[in-house]
Amino acid sequence: MGSPFEITAYPGGPSGAAEAAVLTAYAEIGRVEDLLTDFRDSPLSALNAAAGGAPVTVPAELFDLLEFSLGICRESGGAFDITFSAAGMLWREAFRTGVPPAGGELRKALRLVDHSKVEMDRAACSVRLPEKGMRIGLGSIGKGYGVDRAFRVLKDLGLENFCVNGAGDLRVASGPGAPRPWRVAVKNPFAKDDRAAGFMELRNGALVTSGDYERYFTHRGKKYHHIIDARTGGVRDDIASATVLASTAALANAYTISAMALGPEEGAAFLRRRRDASGVLISSAGAVINCNMKTAEFKGDKEYASNRS
């Protein structure tokens, strides 16, 4: 998944049981990678290769994840769109060269971006991409799903107190006897060091932060980060980070990407409409926007503005 994963677990059973469970969870993350990758042969790659042709039968697990993802595409009004991969290939090259895609190329690729065109047949467990060149990419939700699957493995193997961390996509569990909650730092997007913007104390659930500082390049004085608004094919410069608390990492992952793509105003409205999540957005101007988050403690706007780099 192009990201480091880390699992922290506290043993509570027979000697060696926690270590064996963690190894099994890592194997599950590898299995998810093999299912969802579009960098090499996989069921998802086979679906993309068949675009413009007949429906493709896919594993039920992939079908369910695609159906779930398409629901978020609709909720976000297309700012989050798993069919963005056709245009995303141009941005993948841009991150290699440090030069953003040419406008004409990007507009052409955007003609293939439309989640509403994906044809799903649950009875046949098949998916069809109707136009040649259409592609689905699950980088915006796959890492969170991998965290969730590792979480489920650890739970099923009897662990009660653990944290699965997929490059900042976190899901934690605390048993009844845990001495304290997990304390999770949320990065200050303007600090040059590792200072936190705030902290969350979490016993169970998922917390994901996405920001413009994670992966980016600068071209002719403009910063291009990796979270693209699928409606326009471009990056926003008015939002620095989005943090979302939800029941699963896949949900939190998709919602942070949606909020970053929508920007501070639309993104805040989007999160406030969600009954299954809450969040905090930090605008590029340093404003902290609370979206139904009740348990986080953050510094004031002025301090953020002074920390901008």
Image (cartoon, helix red, strand yellow):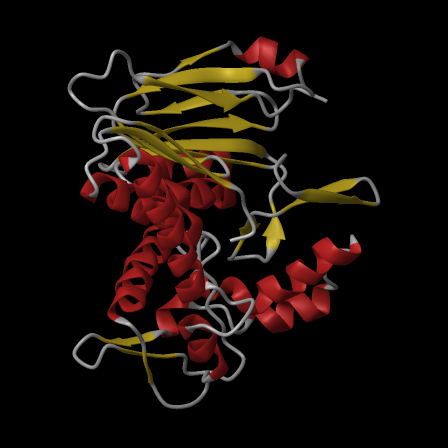
Expressed as whole percent of the image width and height from the top left, the position of residue 38 reads 51, 67
Expressed as whole percent of the image width and height from the top left, the position of residue 24 reads 33, 48
Q: Residue at image x 31%, y 16%?
A: 295
Q: Residue at image x 63%, y 73%?
A: 108
Expressed as whole percent of the image width and height from the top left, the position of residue 249 reads 34, 41
Q: Residue at image x 20%, y 74%?
A: 122
Outermost bottom residue: 54
Residue 199 versus residue 156 in the image, above or below: above
Answer with left or right where residue 202 lies relative to residue 236: left
Q: Is residue 76 visible?
A: no
Residue 296 versus residue 108 in the image, above or below: above
Answer with left or right where residue 9 lies relative to residue 98: left
Outermost front residue: 15
Rendered-image quadrant of the C terminus: top right
The residue lying toward the viewer, choosing from 108 and 125, is 125
Query: Hey, which quadrant is residue 64 in on the image?
Result: bottom left
Q: Residue at image x 54%, y 17%?
A: 196
Answer with left or right where residue 160 lies relative to residue 5: left
Q: Is residue 147 visible?
A: yes
Q: How many marks?
A: 0
Expressed as whole percent of the image width and height from the top left, the position of residue 75 reads 32, 51
Residue 244 versus residue 219 in the image, above or below: above
